[in-house]
Image (cartoon, helix red, strand yellow):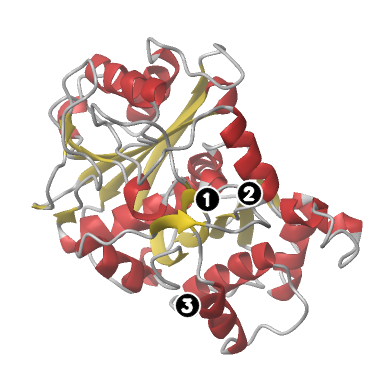
Amino acid sequence: MNRVYTIADQVITGLGTDTESVWQHMLAGDTGVHLIDDQHLFPEAFHASLVDTNALEAAYSNSVIKGDFTRFEKLCLLTALGALQQSHINPAAADTLFILSSTKGNIDLLEKNKKNQYDPERLFLWHTARLITGFFRNTNPPIVISNACISGVVALTTAYDYLSKGLYKNAVVIGADIASEFVISGFQSFKSLSTGPCKPFDLNRDGLNLGEGAAAIVLSTERDQVTEGPALEICGGASANDANHISGPSRTGEGLYLAVKKAMEVSNTLASDVQFISAHGTATSFNDEMESKAFAWAGLSHAPLNSMKGYFGHTLGAAGVIETAITLRSMRRNILLKTLGFAEYGVPEPINILADHLETETRCSLKTASGFGGCNAALIIKKAQQ
């Protein structure tokens, strides 16, 4: 089995258009979540984190990307390009694979004012994936992962599987989702949106904030491709379905527990090895409660844990890639970020929720995600040994 290293990444959220800008805002305790009053998105004002359109267009105009691309496509292309420009990977090479994760893609093209602007095929995720590989002159069939909110973590696990088995040397994993009338209306119909900035794992949490954003992470089996130390490796991942409900997670946390345990098994990781958990932490009642049960059940109550949703909202299919990119920076900088919005402990099982930033050496991290349909995923990241 080949070892799989993280080479470079690029993040765009409501906090900035590159990973370092987003990281610095998170260190400062800033949030991209604001009250949004946009009749095109929803008739009533709501709290969310949106990518600044002017900043996005400036990044696009200053890039080498040319053409008439949608907002979603620009996010995908800009993050992939930004990550690749930090690496020495040849994106056109036959040994490079592209993977796209998203829940909705160009869903905004269904709206009346945009319906006739683009070819109807732009609605399909496979079309966006081929558009991306075409831009980078890569002839390999791209892979699309669309499995609700675990899409990003599953995409990274899929990349690990292909690279570790020697089918490719490099992979570019892209996760992206945008805010749209369809998405906002859907979550509002569930009464799951918070009346203010979200409060993950807090006693007074009342729902989630939606976010839009994108990230790309470049992976490689060649350690000499690592340009920023220490070298970090993806060591394995897993997914499991609790088969509970179309939108509600299992109250026992069994599906997430199984995903975590399997990820630990395939990566030869003990519970005592895990020094940080980047949790899903949506700030909805059932999700946070379920996660506390799963982590306690897996023997992980000791591990410092955070949710990043308070910084840039729930970015759906992009969340796993964005939050993994920030986790990589945390491990390199030896700083674990607090759970923004958390104040009073509000889950049934004992877990170590970060209420403040923590400076500490972190050699092994667990990234998890859970989503509609009872899906759950987990991924193990470690500092590479010499």
Camera-nearest label, 3 or 1: 1
User: Residue 121 location in percent, x, y?
Assistant: 88, 56
Q: Between residues 230 and 306, which one lies in front from this camera angle?
A: 306
Q: How many residues crowd around disc 1 within 10 Å: few (fewer than 14), some, or many (20 or more)? A: some
Q: Earlier in the sequence, mark 3 or mark 2?
A: 2
- Determine which residue is flagged by label 1: 45
| Residue at left offset 72%, top offset 85% | 66
**Residue 274 seen in render:** yes
> Secondary structure under badge 3?
loop
Residue 46 % position (x, y): 50, 48
Number of marks drawn? 3
Image point (50%, 78%), residue name: 55
Which circle's residue, 3 or 1, is located before the other in the chain? 1
- Residue 266 to residue 299: above or below: below
Tag on residue 88? 3
Q: Which residue is mark 2?
A: 42
Q: Quadrant of residue 330?
A: bottom left
Q: Which quadrant of the view contains residue 344? A: top left
Residue 288 placement (x, y as % from top left): 34, 26
Label placed on residue 274: none
